[in-house]
Image: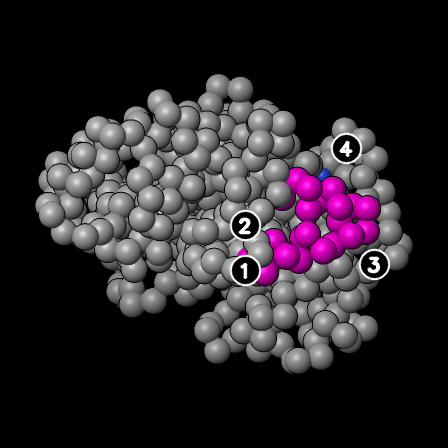
């Protein structure tokens, strides 16, 4: 089985990865392989290394590159597509269907001027950060493996080439819908929507109301996802419509990062000069992207387009209240309070303002609060105690919401640098810690600490 059995041909090109010189498996996710039902010795098999490097097929499957469009930083790009990625397999697992996609696996008809390749650093980065996201319990694509290619890629400098194998319920993006909608391909849209419902959702109606249901549920998932990101200080960095999955999984980790010192306007992407995708802009941008998604669905919602527009608008209007509910509940839980009061938005805003003004580390502040220390200033402490209404803070709740370990930029950067030199010790340690990020491990305090001024990383690069 492959994707081709479900989707109309306009959505993909049958194209194989481009073989590489000397593939070597440098990172493997045994737990994920087991969860996918892959054999215990799967990583040891020669055909596995071949499949993960693009040097051979995934047994029984046919590779494809997917087509999509997208708004990149607000600008419309009619044809993007997998320019350096190949969907190599769709697996039937006890938890449903999952796709395996290679990233950095060579040029495709969608490569434009790109070389179709990826550098080791950014692929290991996606591996660490997406696995951390999974460790936090936040929906995300997963990292299955990284293979070095034995070839060099030319970016800002010469870098070792690598291929990431990642796993997703579906690789369908807002941009995939835009691809069909911009071609006025209503049948394609319908097939795409049905494909996505089957892949990523359950319990939807059988009649034509399923398309509005899809819109409402994609909105609900995205509202929760953005709130979850923000509660751990995550900044995606490139929330273009082609980088937002309809499944509600975090996808396409590029110049993303977790904040150290809190600032609501923080960005890390070196190309995001205007702060379009800053930490506090993410709900607004998600809504903008979802509005593009809703526009694509209009022909499926109702034969009467005026009625369709009303339905879409009503659905979109639910996004911000849903986001706020998740964000406020999440932030209050971080503060040890299980329920949300009508005026808690103000208390959260005051908390964030204090963090910003005192230039506190986002993760450590909540961690210290969980440990019973008294971070923040005296007037904030007094306000918090007043909000607790004489009760003790819910420390179990706080311990579940406030990670001990996050993929701190300076740690990630040194892990990548050492890996480039052939030493994967720090990379493996980080991955281990982030698998269960809420539990304190012995002798690992160094990984909790905020960066020293000299260690701070201010920008990450797309690494394309
Ligand atoms: P991204 O910014 O990674 O989401 O990628 C945006 C678009 O550029 C997608 O269509 C990618 O497939 C394409 N792209 C990124 N890097 C490369 C590359 N090195 N070669 C070919 N296409 C690329
Ligand atoms: Mg992308």
Q: Main secondary structure of the magenta part?
A: helix
Q: Residues within 10 Å of mark 4 (few under 14, many from 20)?
A: few
Disc nearer the start of the sequence (4/3): 3
Which residue is at the far top? 274
What numbered label is drawn on residue 40?
none
Whether the residues at callouts 4 and 2 have beta carbons within 8 Å, the answer is no
Residue 313, quarter of the rendered image: top left
Query: What residue is disc 1 on?
Result: 442
Q: Residues within 10 Å of mark 3 (few under 14, many from 20)?
A: many
Front-lying residue, 357 or 458: 357
Disc nearer the start of the sequence (1/4): 4
Left or right, residue 393 beside residue 136 = left
Dot 3: element: loop
Q: Which residues are magenta?
A: 412-433
Query: What residue is disc 3 on?
Result: 23
Q: Nearer the viewer, mark 3 or mark 2?
A: 2
């Amino acid at each position: 089985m492959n994707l081709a059995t479900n989707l109309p041909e306009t959505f993909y090109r049958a194209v194989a990865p481009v073989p590489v010189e000397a593939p070597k498996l440098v990172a493997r996710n045994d737990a994920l392989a087991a969860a996918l039902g892959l054999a215990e010795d799967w990583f040891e098999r020669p055909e596995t290394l071949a499949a993960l490097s693009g040097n051979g097929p995934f047994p029984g499957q046919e590779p494809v590159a997917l087509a999509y469009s997208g708004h990149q930083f607000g600008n419309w790009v009619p044809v993007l597509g997998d320019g350096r990625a190949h969907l190599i397999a769709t697996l039937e697992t006890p938890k449903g269907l999952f796709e395996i996609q290679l990233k950095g696996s060579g040029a495709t008809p969608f490569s434009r001027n790109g070389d179709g390749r990826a550098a080791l650093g950014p692929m290991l980065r996606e591996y660490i950060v997406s696995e951390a996201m999974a460790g936090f319990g936040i929906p995300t694509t997963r990292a299955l493996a990284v293979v070095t290619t034995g070839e060099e890629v030319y970016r800002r400098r010469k870098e070792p080439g690598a291929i990431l194998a990642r796993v997703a319920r579906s690789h369908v993006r807002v941009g995939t819908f835009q691809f069909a909608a911009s071609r006025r391909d209503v049948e394609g849209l319908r097939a795409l929507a049905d494909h996505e419902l089957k892949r990523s959702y359950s319990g939807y109606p059988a009649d034509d109301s399923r398309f509005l249901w899809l819109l409402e549920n994609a909105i609900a998932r995205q509202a929760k996802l953005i709130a979850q990101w923000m509660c751990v200080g995550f900044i995606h960095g490139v929330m273009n419509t082609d980088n937002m999955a309809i499944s509600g999984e975090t996808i396409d980790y590029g110049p993303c990062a977790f904040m150290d010192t809190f600032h609501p306007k923080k960005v890390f992407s070196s190309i995001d000069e205007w702060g379009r995708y800053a930490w506090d802009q993410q709900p607004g941008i998600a809504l903008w992207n979802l509005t593009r998604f809703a526009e694509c669905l209009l022909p499926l919602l109702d034969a009467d387009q005026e009625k369709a527009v009303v339905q879409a608008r009503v659905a979109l209007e639910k996004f911000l209240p849903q986001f706020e509910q998740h964000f406020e509940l999440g932030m209050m839980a971080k503060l040890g309070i299980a329920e949300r009061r009508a005026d808690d938005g103000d208390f959260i805003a005051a908390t964030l303002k204090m963090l910003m003004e005192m230039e506190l580390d986002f993760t450590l502040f909540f961690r210290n609060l969980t440990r019973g220390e008294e971070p923040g200033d005296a007037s904030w402490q007094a306000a918090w105690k007043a909000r607790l209404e004489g009760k003790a803070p819910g420390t179990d709740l706080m311990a579940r919401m406030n990670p001990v370990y996050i993929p701190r930029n300076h740690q990630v950067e040194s892990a990548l640098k050492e890996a480039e030199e052939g030493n994967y010790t720090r990379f493996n340690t980080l991955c281990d810690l982030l698998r269960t990020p809420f539990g304190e491990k012995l002798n690992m305090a160094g990984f909790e600490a905020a960066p020293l001024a000299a260690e701070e990383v201010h920008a990450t690069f797309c690494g394309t």
